[in-house]
Amino acid sequence: MNRIELIRALPKAELHVHIEGTFEPELMFAIAQRNQIEIPYKSVEELKQAYNFHNLQSFLDIYYAGANVLVHEQDFYDLAWAYFEKCAEDKVVHTEIFFDPQTHTDRGIAFETVFNGLKRACTDAQVKLGISAELIMCFLRHLSEEAAFETLAQALPFKDQIIAVGLDSSELGHPPAKFERVFAKAREEGFLVVAHAGEEGPAEYVWEALDLLKVNRVDHGVRSEEDPKLLERLIAEKMPLTVCPLSNLKLCVVDDMAEHNIQRLLQQGVHVTVNSDDPSYFGGYMNDNFIAIAESLDLSNAELKKLAKNSFEASFITDVEKQKWMQQIDALA
Ligand code: HPA
Ligand code: ZN
């Protein structure tokens, strides 16, 4: 099998995707129209032209604006369903999806409306596509600790259906330490925990995510490379990093895909995985991310298989399920 065929054939788990970041312009226009909400772009083409980012914040401004057209439970269902269809095309067989309730509750949308729409799509993904899906609720780190506590309280009635809590949005100036107490409470309530750290923020934020938030995975984490002691720790603890190559390129975390550190990290023994982050905005879904790094970094078939295996190992599925996918990957040429 050649490299591209192998990428397409590999079963994969996606561990870092924001459902609001899968919102394709065509669906955004359709939902805006049915909800009679104006968007400040005349056409899909004009909207896509605005997808020209120079850092995380320049992306987030457009990402939050796009989410404003989501109002009804069916809107959240349609959003998630469109993503699951992409998963099916890319052989993503398991996914752990971030959602940002505060982006919606701050506009007067009920938590339940968001949750019920997403959950119903997850159930249908299993039944109709054979894709398993879990939900990870993220706190917006540019908002207050108090607002995060309120969001956690809203999630408690659904805690058996939300596998983990996470932390996203503007990283610089909003270190993990700001959310130490709310993460402690979330862990007490039985949630697993993840956090974005070391995307734009320094290695110090990754230390905080580990020591203060006690995360089960680090989202992005690519700036960990700047601190050899931190790398040693990540390797020793087999701490997964959910790396998002096209995102890093589009947000200028790296200047060129040929300079991306995912292969160096993999070769040093860091538990890296490949993910799409906000695929509608960053130019591609799971397989596009795999192809971009495979070609720019000349990844071997063995490295591609290792990345796919890492995705299941780092996921929150059972050990029995993990073994099943490992065997399927091993069986590929
Ligand atoms: N980083 C932080 N917050 C986000 C991102 C990201 O890449 N995507 C959506 N919210
Ligand atoms: Zn992200």
Image: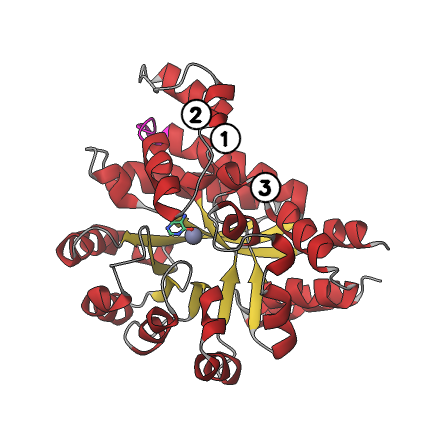
- Pointer 2 residue: 28
Please provide percent x and percent y for residue 13: 58, 57
Can you tell which quarter of the image residue 259 is in? bottom right
Q: Residues within 10 Å of mark 2 (few under 14, many from 20)?
A: some
> Which secondary structure, mark 2?
helix
> Which secondary structure, mark 3?
loop
- Pointer 1 residue: 24
- Pointer 3 residue: 284
Please provide percent x and percent y for residue 73: 34, 31
Q: Main SS of the magenta segment?
A: loop
Q: Which residue: 65% across, 64% down?
A: 307
The yes-or-no answer for disc 1 within 8 Å of ligand 1 is: no
In the rendered structure, which segment of residues is drawn in magenta?
68-74
The yes-or-no answer for disc 3 within 8 Å of ligand 1 is: no
Measure how far apart labels 1 and 3 are at the Cα level. Answer: 11 Å
> Considering depth in this image, is 158 or 87 the residue closer to the camera?
87
Instruction: Please check the rendered image and state whether residue 261 is part of the magenta-colored stretch, yes or no.
Output: no
Please provide percent x and percent y for residue 324: 67, 66
Q: Residue furthest front?
A: 255
Q: Is residue 137 left or right of residue 23?
A: left
Note whether 78 is above or below 84 in the view shown: above
Measure how far apart labels 2 and 1 are at the Cα level. Answer: 6 Å
> Considering depth in this image, is 133 or 198 the residue closer to the camera?
198
Q: Which residue: 56% across, 54% down?
A: 245
Q: Which residue: 80% across, 50% down?
A: 5
Query: Are circles 2 and 1 on residues that touch, CB within 8 Å?
Result: yes
